[in-house]
Amino acid sequence: MRTSFLIGSAVIGAASAYKATTTHYYDGQEGACGCGSSSGGFPWQLGIGNGVYTAAGSQAFFDTAGASWCGAGCGKCYKLTSTGEAPCSTCGTGGVAGQSIIVMVTNLCPYNGNQQWCPNVGDTNQYGYSYHFDIMAQNQVFGDNVVVDFEPIACPGQAVADWGTCQCNGIQETDTTPVLGDDTSLPPPASSSSKPAASSAKPVTSSAKPVTSSAKPAASSTPPSTCGQQQQTLYGQCGGIGWTGPSVCQAPATCKAQNQWYSQCLN
């Protein structure tokens, strides 16, 4: 398909499951990937097919360079598998472990206004997780704010067809999104017998189409000395603001900056 999916296919081939928090929302709007019009979102956003949904992704899923309209992550799909647990004993009741769904990113869950759940790129939310999906649904899908294992996958055929009707199809940003490094998310806590109310948090997205910079930071072409240093594997994180892990990549990969928050080992 398009450039962003070709980038995503490299991640699909290399990534294993990572953890993310989830919530659900419904606002009836087109969302930041343009899947609708000014009068509202396309009906399929409430459910593409059996077990296939749409979601607002945190910034790391929507666009690692910070775009808020037509991000590079628009139209990408993920398989979510429930761990059965909520991220804390007072913020949900979890769900049935092992259940899976597929979501396609059609909206942004921005940090501003959603700090509890949706972190900035390279940061974590209130519960220690780097990634978040806000699933579009009027009711719970497969759990109450359940923590999930997720992995990028190829979108099912109907999702591909639906994505083709969105305004951002073919014109989304082209920075590498997502970038998945070492997963430092905390394991979900032990389940609680209490059943607090489900979160009704929903993303606040702008209908404006801001101009985003396409400039990319220069990537280093000279690998640093590897003597006595721990080395990062291919596609792993190797730098960025606040990064304290390995900064040297295993040959033949080199550490290439994706943005100020994230550098990745790439060939």
Image (cartoon, helix red, strand yellow):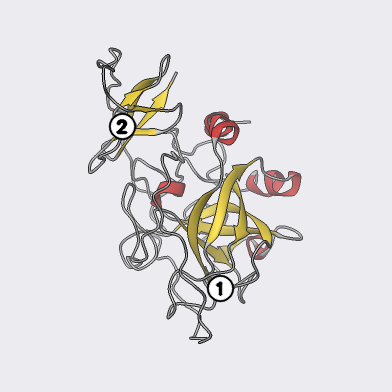
Q: For the N terminus, which image quadrant?
A: top right
Where is residue 254 drawn, in percent x and y? 36, 19
> What amino acid does circle 1 point to?
Gly
> What amino acid does circle 2 point to?
Pro
Residue 199 vertical placement versus 151 (above, below): below
Task: Give the label, 2 or 1, closer to the camera.
Answer: 2
Tell me which corner region of the image, top left, top right, bottom left or bottom right, holds residue 135: bottom right
Element assignment for label 2: loop
Which one is in front, 162 or 6? 6
Residue 263 vertical placement versus 149 (above, below): above
Q: Which mark is residue 177?
A: none
In-image side of 43 versus 83 (left or right) = right
Which mark sits nearer the N-terminus, 2 or 1?
1
Residue named by callout 2: 246
Q: In the current view of this chain or complex, which residue is farthest to the left?
A: 242
User: What residue is at 30 percent from the left and 13 percent from the top?
Assistant: 221
Residue named by callout 1: 94
In-image side of 177 versus 149 (left or right) = left
User: Label 2: few (<14), some or many (≥20) within 10 Å?
Assistant: some
Residue 59 vertical placement versus 214 (above, below): below
Which one is in front, 258 or 263? 263
User: What residue is at 27 percent from the left and 27 percent from the top?
Assistant: 217
In-image side of 76 versus 204 (left or right) = right
Element assignment for label 1: loop
User: What residue is at 64 percent from the left and 69 percent from the top?
Assistant: 142
User: What residue is at 45 percent from the left and 18 percent from the top?
Assistant: 267
Where is residue 212 drawn, in percent x and y? 33, 40
Tell me which corner region of the image, top left, top right, bottom left or bottom right, holds residue 161: top right
Tell me which corner region of the image, top left, top right, bottom left or bottom right, holds residue 143: bottom right
Where is residue 222 drawn, in percent x and y? 28, 12
